[in-house]
Image (tube, rainbow, N blue to C red):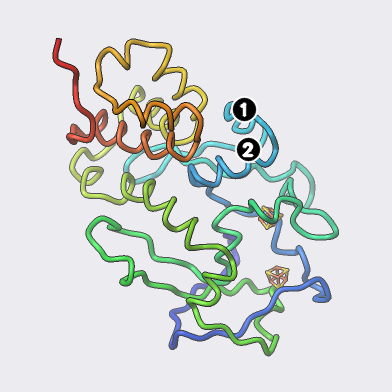
Amino acid sequence: MNNDMLSQPLTSDRFRFACHKNLSCFTACCANLNLVLTPYDVIRLRTRLGLPSEDFLKKYTNTSIDKGYGFPIVLLKMNNDKKQRCPFVSVNGCTVYEDRPGACRIYPLGRAASKIRERKKSDDFFFIIKEPHCLGFNEPKEWLIQDWIKDQGLDEYNTMNDFFMDIVTGKNFRRIKSLTPNQMQMFYMGCYNLDEFKNFIFKSTFMKRFEVDPDQICRIKTDDVELMKFGSRWLNFALFGEKTLSIRRH
Ligand code: SF4
Ligand code: SF4
């Protein structure tokens, strides 16, 4: 996440690490980060903060464009101060700890996330990320990778993030090469600005054009995770022409 970090392959499925308040580096890592937020991160954080998706995105994020395929990437906006601290850090640690982004949870591991659709989950590849200021590696506590993933609540995040990774790392982007400005707006809405996506579904001719299961309509009205999953189906249909939605026959 930080520009000075060093990535190393893991030579076994164990690593030594502990992070706690008694370390002099405590919260030093929560600054000057290129912290990419996934759609699920946005749901968790904006729900935690009680904000509509558009307000959260305006207040807490910057948007960058993927250099390869041109899709919008949302990054957590660091404070505009000397250290560029995360807006959620305090002297006592992370103020959104239970809903912190997946990238914060997985550190000091990294997860190779490519071609999810074409690879089994058990093929996931992990590596270690060492930030020079991080003293956690000097601690005696030893972890198995799978225990760290469980401890940090990462299974849920990985499962939810795979809906997003399925879009951005699948073969479709390699086929279409890049997005048009209109497609970029669709991508941003369908991935991140889910309130706007919900309005699009229910306040436009969307429901007249597509057949959607009535149970699913109920779920996407009330559950942002279901809305996010539906957004990934819609994007695969609208951007790549996949048969993930059925057009109504009149
Ligand atoms: S620098 Fe490392 S050990 Fe220190 S608070 Fe951050 S993650 Fe924990
Ligand atoms: S969200 Fe929490 S854990 Fe992540 S960088 Fe900010 S303060 Fe640190």
Q: In the depicted view, which residue is nearer to us: 177 or 228?
A: 228
Single out the residue that lies furthest toward the left: 249
Q: Splitting the image into 4 quarters, where does residue 246 fall? A: top left
Kindly report the distance in space between the C-alpha atoms of the residues bearing marks 1 and 2: 7 Å
- Residue positioned 44% across, 58% down in the render: 158
Q: In the depicted view, which residue is nearer to us: 135 or 159?
A: 159
Q: Type of residue at label 2?
A: Arg
The residue where tag 2 is placed is 46
Give the image location of residue 97, x and y in percent. 70, 56
Quadrant of the image for the N terminus?
bottom right
The residue where tag 1 is placed is 52
Q: Is residue 117 placed above or below 21 in the rendered structure?
A: above
Secondary structure beneath dot 1 equals: loop
Q: Type of residue at label 1?
A: Pro
Residue 164, labelled with which disc?
A: none
Q: Is 36 on the left-hand or right-hand side of 177?
A: right
Give the image location of residue 136, x and y in percent. 69, 78
Q: Is 208 on the left-hand or right-hand side of 105?
A: left
